[in-house]
Image (spheres, rainbow, N blue to C red):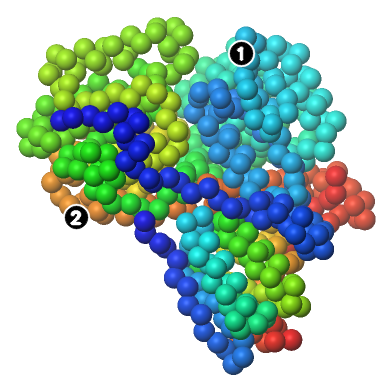
């Protein structure tokens, strides 16, 4: 099976940034969830997830994000999204999850927000 | 060539479309794990309660399958909303419906349509999505659907599965009335929308295009699935769906001798049972005719019928093993084809007759068109694809890219967006008090 999601974890100063490239869907979201939870456990509960290069996200991708939110909430943390693609942003808007996950167009702004 | 039984195929292929652990499941699970977060999400997330009027499985028809895929795809994004299906059924049917079917409309009972409208009016349902095809509703040309619409107080959106270029006066009247009464009429291709404007005079602002949804299938190499199916070295052609005379399958069978001249190891799979409505009137006479042609041409080793209603996983498995998918349909005006949409979603090289849906979906290098009723055309084009690896890969890549945009998870978002806009528009028109409004992203909608 072709896996159509690349996941890179980097740090922007002290903040972990998970960079996603491709599609976050039923085939790939379990791996994304696994990486995200590992990052939270290893690097702390303040995380930026860059979806600037995500083509599509489905409800299982949103479910993985909510799973991550549960983990960071237990430790007073935060998940912030980087996204400037209308198709992906629309998914957050129509579900109302844009009120749960702050969304920024640039990584710098997202890192600044999550750092607080 | 030795054919495998269905059980053998099941045992030897492990591929399946994954079950999503969707947003809805995650949030429901939270209810027992983290009530505080669950409540926060319940307060923050948008809520919209759609109802769907359609045939519904276990009824075996394309629109029933469409409605189930559609409703379940939308529900995955709306964990705090309750979807409702109003299933249209024939009086004598006793269907073991899912729990989501909360109302049954008796197809030929006019009163049942009035009662259904009252059921919706008295409920918390925000919007009604009607799957329209003339044959699924009662009365002449399915005109009883208008009784439902005329008595409905909630906003409605119609998805049109048939848009005729040359309707009868009654068919035209019905579609015009649907266009008048519904807030938006959805077609699955641009050509359908244009016909709505040109032939039916529908207001352009009320007509929109959302593609036919397709399963979320990532690309697999045909060879790996063929190996599992025990046909590793064969070229596989296929057609699937509910079999009826309009499918034109005989023209592919008649093309087979010519295809076999150059590609002797080719098989043609005809997947699916006879359409229940057709079987009721003429039994298996069309399939028997096809079998007779197979015998006359000595093609028993090269044409296989699988006379069953296939599950999604079975269907996808066969599609993944397919080298060339063929829709040899005979009706030029066909505006929608679920089977073609599925093949595009699986990224297949496709050969089709130029009915309206195929013409548009397969344009820009996404497939090849051949004349209607033309075994020679089918043979020549199919042979060319089998000969030319580059052409085949190009067709597959282009089809797959188009199919990703039409994956059900994307189509569900398009419909949810439309539902929200319609509900907001209706409530604004009704001038609800300001304190009844709640925010949905950049826009605003009102509480039930």
Q: Secondary structure at mark 1?
A: loop
Decide: marks 1, 2 in contact (CB < 8 A)? no
Pick the quarter of the image with the N terminus of chain A: bottom left
User: Can residue B147 be seen by looking at this rendering?
Assistant: no
Pick the quarter of the image with the C terminus of chain A: bottom right
Q: Quadrant of residue B378?
A: top left
Q: What is the tally of numbered marks visible in this picture?
A: 2
Residue at horizontal 49%, vertical 41%? B212
Q: Nearer the viewer, residue B444 or B35?
A: B35
Percent position of residue B338, x then y: 45, 35
Q: Quadrant of residue B257?
A: top left
Left or right: residue B144 versus residue B333 is right
Q: Quadrant of residue B264?
A: top left
Percent position of residue B163, x then y: 51, 29
Name the residue that disc number 1 marks: B93
Q: Is residue B112 above or below residue B414?
A: above
- Chain identifier of the residue bearing label 1 in the image: B
Name the residue that disc number 2 marks: B390
Q: Nearer the viewer, residue B52 or A34?
A: A34
Left or right: residue B12 versus residue B59 is left
Q: Is residue B415 above or below residue A105?
A: above
Mark 1 and mark 2: Cα distance apart in space: 50 Å
Q: Is residue B69 above or below residue B428?
A: above
Residue at horizontal 16%, vertical 35%? B266
Disc on the earlier residue, 1 or 2: 1
Residue at horizontal 69%, vertical 46%? B419
User: Can residue B14 be seen by looking at this rendering?
Assistant: yes
């Amino acid at each position: 099976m072709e896996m159509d999601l690349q996941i890179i974890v980097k740090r922007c100063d002290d903040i972990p940034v998970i960079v996603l490239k491709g599609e976050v869907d039923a085939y790939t979201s379990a791996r994304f969830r696994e990486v995200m939870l590992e990052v939270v456990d290893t690097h702390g509960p303040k995380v930026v997830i860059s979806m600037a290069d995500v083509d599509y996200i489905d409800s299982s991708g949103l479910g993985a994000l909510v799973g991550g939110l549960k983990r960071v909430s237990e430790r007073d943390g935060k998940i912030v999204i980087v996204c400037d693609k209308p198709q992906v942003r629309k998914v957050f808007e129509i579900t109302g999850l844009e009120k749960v996950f702050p969304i920024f167009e640039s990584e710098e702004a997202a890192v600044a927000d999550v750092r607080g | 060539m030795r054919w495998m039984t269905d059980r053998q195929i099941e045992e030897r292929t492990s591929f399946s479309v994954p079950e999503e652990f969707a947003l809805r499941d995650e949030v429901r699970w939270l209810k027992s794990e983290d009530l505080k977060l669950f409540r926060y999400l319940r307060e923050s997330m948008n809520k919209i309660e759609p109802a769907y009027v359609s045939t519904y499985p276990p009824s075996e028809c394309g629109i029933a399958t469409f409605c189930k895929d559609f409703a379940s795809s939308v529900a995955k994004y709306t964990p705090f909303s309750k979807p409702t299906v109003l299933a249209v059924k024939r009086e004598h049917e006793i269907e073991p419906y899912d729990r989501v079917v909360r109302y049954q409309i008796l197809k030929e009972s006019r009163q049942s349509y009035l009662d259904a409208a009252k059921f919706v009016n008295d409920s918390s349902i925000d919007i009604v999505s009607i799957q329209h095809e003339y044959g699924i509703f009662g009365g002449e040309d399915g005109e009883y659907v208008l009784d439902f619409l005329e008595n409905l107080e909630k906003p409605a959106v119609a998805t049109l599965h048939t848009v005729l270029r040359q309707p009868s006066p009654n068919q035209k009247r019905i579609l015009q009335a649907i266009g008048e009464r519904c807030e938006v009429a959805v077609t699955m291709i641009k050509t359908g929308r244009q016909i709505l404007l040109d032939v039916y005079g529908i207001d352009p602002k009320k007509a929109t295009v959302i593609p036919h949804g397709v399963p979320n299938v990532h690309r697999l190499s045909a060879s790996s699935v063929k190996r599992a199916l025990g046909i590793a070295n064969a070229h596989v052609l296929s057609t699937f769906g509910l079999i009826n005379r309009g499918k034109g399958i005989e023209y592919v069978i008649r093309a087979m001798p010519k295809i076999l001249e150059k590609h002797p190891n080719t098989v043609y799979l005809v997947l699916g049972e006879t359409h229940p409505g057709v079987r009721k009137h003429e039994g298996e006479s069309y399939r028997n005719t096809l079998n007779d042609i197979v015998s006359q041409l000595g093609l028993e080793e090269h044409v296989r019928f699988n006379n069953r209603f296939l599950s999604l996983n079975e269907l996808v498995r066969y599609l993944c093993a397919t080298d060339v998918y063929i829709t040899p349909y005979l009706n030029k005006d066909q505006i929608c084809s679920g089977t073609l949409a599925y093949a595009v979603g699986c990224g297949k090289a496709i050969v089709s007759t130029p009915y309206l849906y195929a013409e548009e979906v397969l344009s820009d290098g996404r497939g090849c068109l051949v004349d209607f009723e033309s075994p020679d055309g089918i043979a020549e084009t199919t042979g060319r694809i089998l000969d030319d690896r580059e052409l085949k890969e190009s067709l597959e890549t282009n089809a797959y890219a188009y199919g990703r945009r039409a994956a059900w998870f994307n189509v569900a978002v398009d419909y949810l967006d439309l539902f929200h806009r319609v509900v907001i528009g209706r409530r604004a028109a009704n001038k609800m008090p300001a304190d009844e409004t709640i925010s949905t992203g950049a826009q605003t909608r009102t509480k039930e």
